[in-house]
Image (cartoon, helix red, strand yellow):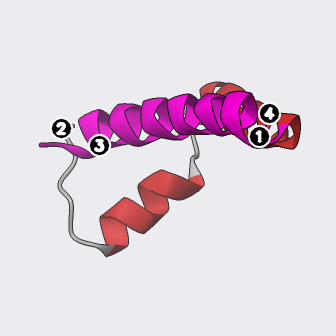
Amino acid sequence: MTIERYLRGIAGSFALVSVLLAHYHSPYWLIFTGFVGANLLQSAFTNWCPMITILKKLGVESQA
């Protein structure tokens, strides 16, 4: 898998898990969901995402 696919999987997993935690545990978990969404939005404008930096350091290859 490539960085791009890992990133989508991680972001989707974080969002789903935090929504489930908000439903079953505490609505404060929706703050984490908002953080994931805000991070995705800022990466669309700046072309930089902290998770991509982490994945590159772990040796995951990019599609480009």
Magenta region: which residues? Answer: 1-26
Q: Choose mark 4 or mark 3, whichever is in front.
A: 4
Residue bearing mark 3: 6
Return the disc, 2 or 4, that comes first in the chain's sequence. 4
Residue 47 in the magenta stretch? The answer is no
- Distance of label 2 from label 4 (alpha carbons): 32 Å
Rendering quarter of residue 33? top right
Q: Earlier in the sequence, mark 1 or mark 3?
A: 3
Q: Counting other residues with Cα less than 10 Å from the Cα at mark 4, is it few (<14), some (14-19), or many (20 or more)?
A: some
Q: CA distance from mark 2 to mark 3?
A: 11 Å
Residue 3 visible within the image:
yes
Query: Where in the figure is residue 64, as x and y percent of width and height?
Result: 21, 37
* Left or right: 51, with 20 as reference point: left
Which residue in the protein does label 2 denote? 63
Give the residue drawn at x 80%, y 33%.
30
Name which of mark 2 and mark 3 comes first in the sequence.
Answer: 3
Q: Which of the numbered marks, if any, corresponds to residue 35?
A: 1
Depth check: give the residue in front, 11 or 47.
11
Residue holding disc 4:
30
Label 1 sits on a secondary structure element that is helix
CB atoms of marks 4 and 3 within 8 Å? no
Tag 1 or tag 4, which sits nearer the N-term? 4
Frontmost of labels 2 and 4 is 4
Mark 4 touches mark 1? (CB < 8 Å)? no
Q: Residue furthest left?
A: 1
Q: CA distance from mark 2 to mark 1?
A: 26 Å
Q: What kind of residue is marked 1?
A: Phe
Residue lying at 28% horizontally and 73% vertically, measured from the top left: 58
Q: Helix, strand, or loop for circle 3?
A: helix
